[in-house]
Amino acid sequence: MKFSVSSSDLLSKLSLEIGAISSNPVLPILEDFLFTVEGSKLTIAATNLETTIITALEVNVEEEGIIAIPAKILLDTLKALPDQPINFIIDDESRLIEITSAFGKYKLSGDNAADFPDIPAEDGVDSISMSATNLQEAITKTIFATSNDELRQAMMGVFVQVDYNNVIFVATDAHKLVKYTFGDVSSEVSQNFIVPRKGLTLLRNALSSDVNIDIAFNQTNAFFTFGDSKVIIRLIDAKYPDYNAVIPVNNPHMLTMGRKDLQNSLKRIAIYANKTTNQVVLSLDQGSLTISAQDLDFSNEATEQLTCTYEGEPMTIGFNAKFLVEMLGIMDTDDILLELSTPNRAGVLLPAEQNDNETLLMLVMPVMMSN
């Protein structure tokens, strides 16, 4: 097996691939990149058995072949080299790899490609197509609300509901919930699946915003194909909770105000909140919002009053400040709308203005206030 390639081009591909290699793999072969040279193309694969990343690039091929190469030593070598052509010569019998640069030669041992796990095939898949920008936006707006609770497997991922020309992304950890819907997708199916958080994080890092992305999925895996790359993520096999059942429909109390003003006030007040509950109290009345917090253990206390537009009866409700700040940070509108029903029911946080093609709804559970 012989080929030559630009060191910077190869480094760029491997920097993307390394995300799929875990620091403590269950099998030694999972510490390797799989190199397959065929025609004029080098295809590189890396996997942690949950997420597989495959990329390809054009190289100068003298001899085709396949080899598993230890990832860390190869990546470290390329990082230490300035941009230049490098040559790979691999002995198929001994699996000895010789890399030649303008500076000298580097030798390392490869592994048997047959030991590398089989890459999932796109069998019996449905498919949709969307822009990478939309997908990145959907991941960013939902992934933070996924759960870390391993007893709730379904909530450790983002629920994706494909409904012909609409796609709904939902994430919840039982304290907060995000529902992000957008149209402008090409699909002929109505299906749903749950994508784990770790895989989505790798996918978001791999995407460039100016490409279109084809998504194929079956009961086991989702296949995200864009440009010369593919990310395969094993899906979570669990039933997602009925999220619509927890979204309150009748919310007669409505607060409208500047997003940044509310977020900055919450950040300041939260400094004085109890560090276990992060509880802040919102007291709402006509034209005014009072935000307060106290930590009785340390005699800490803070209050701020903000102007706002409020429709409804006066109300006092407690929330986790950390959750509210995080949710406001995900939004990108100037003004927000907080819809409330009673002090013991979830609040619904919305952008004051929504696009026709895109809607965002966030729900946050109240923190019960002690009398």
Image: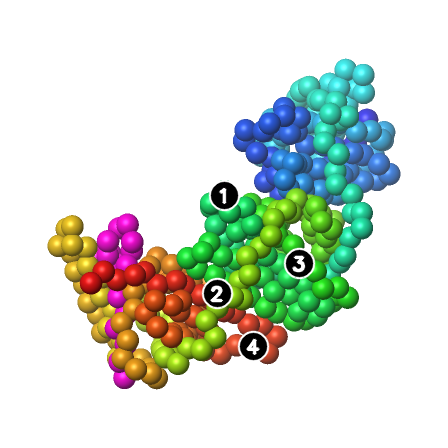
Which of labels 4 and 2 is toward the front?
Answer: 2
| Residues at discs 2 and 3 in contact (Cβ within 8 Å) | no
- Seen at 62% across and 28% down, the residue is 31
Q: Amino acid at mark 1?
A: Leu
**CA–CA distance between discs 2 and 3?**
19 Å
Per the model, the C-alpha gap separating discs 2 and 1 is 20 Å
Label 2 sits on residue: 246
- Residue shown at 44%/59% (left/top)? 176
Q: Is residue 135 above or below residue 21?
A: below
- In the rendered image, the quadrant that contains the C terminus is bottom left
Residue matched to label 3? 192
Magenta stretch? 267-286
Horizontal side of residue 46 vs 66, given as left or right: left
Q: Earlier in the sequence, mark 4 or mark 2?
A: 2
Nearer to us: label 1 or label 3:
1
Estimate the x, y position of residue 326 in percent, counting from the top left.
40, 59
Whether residue 198 can be seen here: yes
